[in-house]
Amino acid sequence: MKKSVTILIFLLQISSLPYSAYAQINVKDFGAKGDGVILDTHSIQDAIDKAFENGGGIVDVPAGTYLIGTLILKDNIELHLQPGSVLIGSPDYKDYTEKISKFQSRTNGLYAKYFMIFAEGAKNISITGTGIIHGNGLTNFQQVHPMNLRPTSVRLVDCENVLIRDVHLLEAASMALHLLGCRIVNIDNIVIEENVQFNRDGLDIDCCQGVKLSNSQFSTGDDAVVMKSTSDVICRDIAITNCIINSKAGCALKIGTESNGGFKNITVSNCNIKDLTIHAGIELMAVDGGMMQNVLIENITMENVATPFFIRTGIRAKPYMTGQYVGKIDDVRDIFLNNISVVNAKFPSGIMGLHNRKIKNIVINNYSVRNSETQNAVSYNEVPFKEFSYPMAIMFKNLPAYGLYCRNVEELHLQNISMYSAENEVRPAITFDRVNNLELFAVKAEVKSKTIPMIHLRNSSNITAGFCRSIGITDVLFEEENTVKNLNLYNNILQPGQIEIAKVTTMPEGPLFDDFKTELKYSVEKGEIFDGLSAQSLNNNPLKFNIEMNVRGSVQMCLLLLNDSKKPEKIIIKYQGITQEFLVNWNEWGWAPITLLKEFPTDQKVDFEISAFDQNSLLKISKVYFRYQDIAKTD
């Protein structure tokens, strides 16, 4: 009896399933021609709408070329592209429906307002089949700026349970596939191919959670696979595996640049990267205040790349919407690079934190690189900071190392490293500057000149190096300036006549805090000296000044601050009835970049008051600089 009841309940459940479980609708039944001449947008949309009315289903696109503007996907819809089917974007703007997303993001309107396929707030949607989504961007929509005049091929916003499988996305006019604020996304066995350079990203995973990308191929004009955080929503729980990636003028894999919400729990594995003539194979960059934490990249091969990898913290601090500004600088930490092999690299990799906000806990294990080019290196003390600049590996020219340059890093572990130089190389393989708690184990590198060390160290402390050796004719394995403290060497392997360590005179530091352009400045000239700078203590002592504001557009106020407290402290800025705050979570001199909430269309004298939130504050202030910030420029 119980068994009969169970069967009856099961049959009732089956009969109550929505029509979507079985419905399959052919777009040609709704008038789609598929001749590449007649606009098929309305016919295909009618098929989608009918399936949606029925509770969902498969919208089938048979072989043919379908000229479309904007299609809107809805709940429980699978758009299935049969072999031989092509959705091709109309070359006419009037065929697209302008869409500005409700999801708050810097991309809204600025990056794109026209889309071939769009959905917002939809659940259980799919784009499948081996057909093609063709952006028609190879001969149309060639203008680089403004970017929003070029339609994006597919944009899904705030969607949940998304499947994109087997489709080919070709010649996107802008981004090929942009996921914004989506959750639980599976992308498998897709191909993205573009033959136009610049602002044609392949896949952008933006403010998303729970995204899996696998078994896919990318050949793009700009960045191929990008993770962004263009709002205060963190991009997290992303897994990428088994992909083949190349780019004509961008990165293969990028996390950043836009990084307001930040990134967490990212895994990339088993990927092949090749033929990147300008940018890096891997770029990990947090420059808009957000965190980056728990990133694992492993089992990667690269060939013919400009730069293998670049890890960067910056303080561009670009806001993601009007009336908002970045109020703190978060950590970049816990990044692991394992089993990476690089052939034919042009430039050195880099790990570069801020003077006041070091990158923390980086582990590089089993890394091999062969370089094919050399550069005329700048001096060890002349590498610019460029903390406010748009971040990319090529922003640093002629670095004083051919394999790896590291500055402002805390807790760095290198193990089983092999580096091979170009034929005429005269730089060390690795240079460390302001790197604390450094561990080197089984590091070997080729050196082409007897007078050049394998590794140069400056301004660093707590260093352990063992089982390291050079390949080549260098007289010195390690070279340290006088500013190096607590260097421990053990079991390193020396060639006949080679010495393990040589001490050299410390090079004087250049200007640390004046390497960005601005003419509007206020400095504390007659204050006390704190760590080498004239400054005013903000302990019950607000800094008050007025200045003639002559900067147009968006203005970024840059405060040079020192926090002598062991805990973060809050700074308060007041001007013309407006109050803004910034969290100072560092204890060395460093910039706090604060985009002002008010613009000044004409010259006017403005009174500013800068104070500490805590009445017993240990904050000190030395300089206040103002600079124009181009918030309308796309990344």
Image: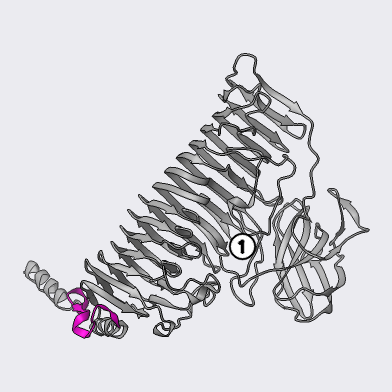
| Mark 1, secondary structure of its residue | loop
Q: Nearer the viewer, residue 54 or 343?
A: 343
Q: Nearer the viewer, residue 482 or 277?
A: 277
In the image, 395: left or right of 110?
A: right
Residue 531 locus on image (x, y percent)? 83, 48
Q: Is residue 121 visible?
A: no
Displayed quadrant of residue 582: bottom right
**Region in magenta:** 18-38
Task: Give the residue at mark 1.
Answer: 288
Q: Is residue 95 above or below residue 171?
A: below
Residue 409 locus on image (x, y percent)? 64, 44
Q: Nearer the viewer, residue 346 or 14?
A: 346
Residue 199 locus on image (x, y percent)? 50, 65
Q: Is residue 316 visible?
A: yes
Amino acid on which the number 1 mark rests in the picture: Asp
Q: Is residue 240 above or below residue 80?
A: above
Residue 68 locus on image (x, y percent)? 33, 79
**Is 91 a magenta residue?**
no
Displayed quadrant of residue 390: bottom right
Image quarter in which the N terminus is found? bottom left
